[in-house]
Amino acid sequence: MKSRYDAAKNVFVDSIDIDDYIELNTSVAAYKQLEHSINKPLKMILLFGKPGTGKSILLNRIQEKLKHKKEIYYFDTPSINEKEFFHKLFKVLTKKDLPQNTEVNFSTLVDFCKNLRGKREIIILLDEAQMYGAEMMEKIRLLSDTRAVKFIVSLHKTEDEDLIAKEHFQSRIWEVIELKNATKEDQTTYIHKKLLKKNLFEIANSIKDKDMKLIHQFTKGNFRECNKLMFTIFEIYEYYDQNEPAEINYGALSKKIVEMAALKLGYIDV
Ligand SMILES: Nc1ncnc2c1ncn2[C@@H]1O[C@H](COP(=O)(O)OP(=O)(O)OP(=O)(O)O)[C@@H](O)[C@H]1O
Ligand SMILES: [Mg+2]
């Protein structure tokens, strides 16, 4: 028989499933800010934050919410080359497929956009934009200058790099939204709601405030790290449940198991 911890474990598989979106204080604030920026006559919006802070899920959420009101498209992983990117863009703008073996001429695309001004407003959500080169970014900027296409550019912030300081993002065409790691309160809501959505009430209730504090300490409130830690915790539970059930207290999360998981993931040293 499958352990109940198998279901709990799978709750924390890292994925972007819009049905699993949870309204947290910080994500709601970022969502509102993003929606507000989209409604302003701005050209470029920068959404940034460390890996695992929820940028992709937020972009998906906004697309889901606005798609009936606006022309909004989500571009996930950057195209391998410029040619492919402009093909994709061409399709979105013209609603037609490009004939085979033809290339999009950039200045024609710009002219096309100029003609759209005032008639259509197209919003493109560009995820993982740290992968686009400087030249591509410049072209994207030129397209947004036509005011027919608005780009929401999402990228990671790395530890040692202050993106905002980069020349590129200094100009006033940019509006900046930053996503941060979750507070302990938001992370607690996240963990509880994720489990409750799958009807895992008993397991959700077994995680008390002191456990949440420890989990927050280990993961620093990063959603991806939190998923990894919770997954590993329940993986260990699953093992005990199937092999040594007498070892488990079903009513309270074991600090020892949380620490074992943290050890396994390298949050603590032996
Ligand atoms: N508000 C939320 N509701 C539900 N799940 C969330 C929420 N915020 C983050 N997550 C989950 O946390 C994980 C990390 O989020 P996401 O992939 O969006 O981060 P990211 O900032 O795009 O990371 P990267 O920079 O590495 O692409 C995902 O599994 C996502 O589903
Ligand atoms: Mg992402």
Image (cartoon, rainbow, N blue to C red):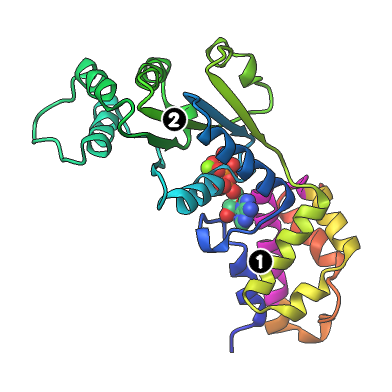
Q: Residue at x 91, y 61 (%)?
A: 210
Q: Which residue is mark 1?
A: 194
What residue sits 67% from the left and 50% below the top? 223
Residue toward you, 92 or 184: 92
Q: Which residues are magenta?
A: 219-239
Q: Is residue 4 above or below residue 114?
A: below
Residue 193 percent coordinates (x, y): 70, 66
Image quadrant containing the N terminus: bottom right
Q: Residue at x 49, y 26 (%)?
A: 41
Does the Cβ of the disc 2 residue fall within 8 Å of ligand 2?
A: no
Q: Is residue 107 visible?
A: yes
Q: Is mark 1 within 8 Å of ligand 1?
A: yes
Badge 1 element = helix
Amino acid of disc 1: Lys
107 sits to left or right of 22: left
Residue 246 in magenta?
no
- Label 2 crowd (10 A; few <14 / some 14-19 / many >=20): many
Say the numbered circle drawn on residue 55: none
Question: Can residue 267 be seen from the camera position used here?
Answer: no
Residue 79 in percent (x, y) is at: 33, 34
Which disc, if any, is residue 151?
Answer: 2
- Where residue 86 appears, as percent x and y from the top left, is 26, 29
